[in-house]
Image: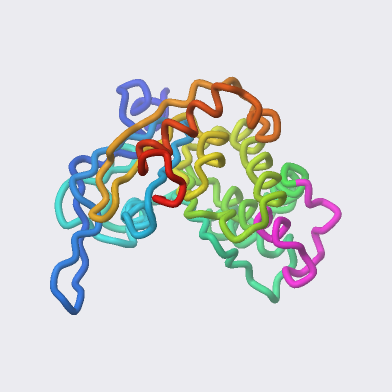
């Protein structure tokens, strides 16, 4: 018998659906419209990246999908079910890691398994698999303070994967890292995504990062955030940012997105 997910996939139900969504906040000067009539679908195993000026509502959209912000109007659904509270099997990764400093790498990853309700006897093998996937096996007993920034982000990613989310929401997760570490983490994320095939909605200000990662880049306007363009990234996978930077197609995609953001001027974003 087909599972519910398989039935929904066959019926063409998107993993994430935003239909004419507007989100507003109360401010000292009254109602502040953050997101205005945004409609967006993310399919199963699709990697979608949101870009746009600071304060345009990209992170607000992620928080709304996670059930942390309420939409003022429109509909948000995950796997065909309207979001009124935090949905099951949604993973959220922030710009700053949120590791528990008193737990080891293994212990922090196990938190995700606990949240997912994985029985204790099954956890050791799953943790071992994740440590190998993240290339952290030799650091399993290290504490967060003993790890580099990139390794801490890998542990955060491992904890999210341990939770086994159908959807991974990632809000500038590598934004605080230096360029070399960011590229390395992007490469790790793509390698893991190609293995796990989760649906990912990723926010970044880095246009090259967006093009290197995405199946589709969605461009937001200044606040109130509206979708002003979508670019399907038809570059072969697996991808390597170092190699892509010399590819004319990669340059064409990044230039087109810059033009959408502000006449090709990086300062406009």
Seen from the viewer's position, the closer of residues 265 and 69 is 265
Q: Is residue 137 magenta?
A: yes
- Looking at the image, residue 185 sits to the left or right of residue 42; the answer is right
Name the colouring of the figure: rainbow
Q: Which x, y percent locates residue 118?
A: 59, 52
Residue at image position (47%, 45%) is 202
Which of the pair 8/55 is nearer the observer?
55
Identify the magenta region: 135-155
Total marks shown come to: 0
Is the magenta region chiefly helix, strand or loop? helix
Q: Nearer the viewer, residue 224 or 202?
A: 224
| Residue at the limit of the structure toward the right, as seen here | 138
Looking at the figure, which quarter contains the N terminus?
top left
Residue 188 position within the rendered picture, expressed as x and y whole percent measured from the top left? 68, 42
Judge from the rendering whether residue 182 lies leftward or rightward of residue 47; answer left or right.
right
Q: Is residue 111 left or right of residue 18?
A: right
Pick whichever, 230 or 256, lies toward us. 256
**Within the image, what quadrant is residue 81 found in?**
top left
Q: Is residue 264 above or below residue 234?
A: below
Residue at image point 20% right, 61% down: 24
Residue at 13% of width from left, 73% of height from top?
30
Does the magenta segment cover residue 183?
no
Q: Is residue 139 left or right of residue 57?
A: right
Q: Quadrant of residue 57?
A: bottom left
Q: Residue at x 64, y 52 (%)?
A: 158
Across and down, in percent, residue 243 comes to 69, 29
């Amino acid at each position: 018998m087909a599972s519910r997910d398989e039935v929904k996939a066959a019926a063409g139900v998107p993993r994430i659906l935003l239909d004419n969504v507007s989100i507003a906040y109360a401010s000292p000067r009254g109602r502040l419209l953050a997101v205005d009539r945004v409609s967006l679908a993310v399919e199963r195993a699709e990697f979608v990246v949101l870009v746009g000026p600071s304060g345009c509502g990209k992170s607000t959209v992620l928080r709304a999908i996670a059930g942390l912000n309420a939409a003022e109007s429109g509909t948000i659904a995950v796997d065909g079910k309207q979001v009124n509270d935090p949905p099951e099997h949604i993973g959220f990764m922030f710009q700053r890691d949120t590791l528990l400093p008193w737990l080891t790498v293994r212990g922090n990853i196990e938190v995700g398994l606990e949240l997912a309700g994985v029985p204790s006897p099954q956890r050791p093998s799953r943790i071992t698999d994740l440590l190998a996937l993240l290339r952290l096996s030799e650091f399993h007993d290290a504490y967060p303070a003993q790890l580099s920034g990139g390794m801490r982000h890998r542990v955060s990613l491992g904890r999210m994967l341990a939770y086994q989310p159908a959807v991974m929401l990632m809000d500038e997760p590598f934004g605080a890292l230096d360029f070399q570490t960011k590229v390395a983490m992007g490469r790790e994320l793509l390698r893991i995504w190609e293995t796990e095939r989760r649906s990912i909605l990723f926010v970044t200000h880095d246009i090259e990062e967006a093009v290197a990662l995405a199946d589709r880049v969605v461009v937001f306007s200044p606040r109130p955030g509206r979708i002003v363009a979508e670019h399907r990234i038809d570059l072969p996978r697996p991808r390597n940012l170092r190699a892509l930077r010399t590819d004319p197609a990669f340059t064409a995609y990044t230039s087109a997105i810059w033009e959408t953001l502000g006449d090709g001027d990086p300062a406009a974003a």
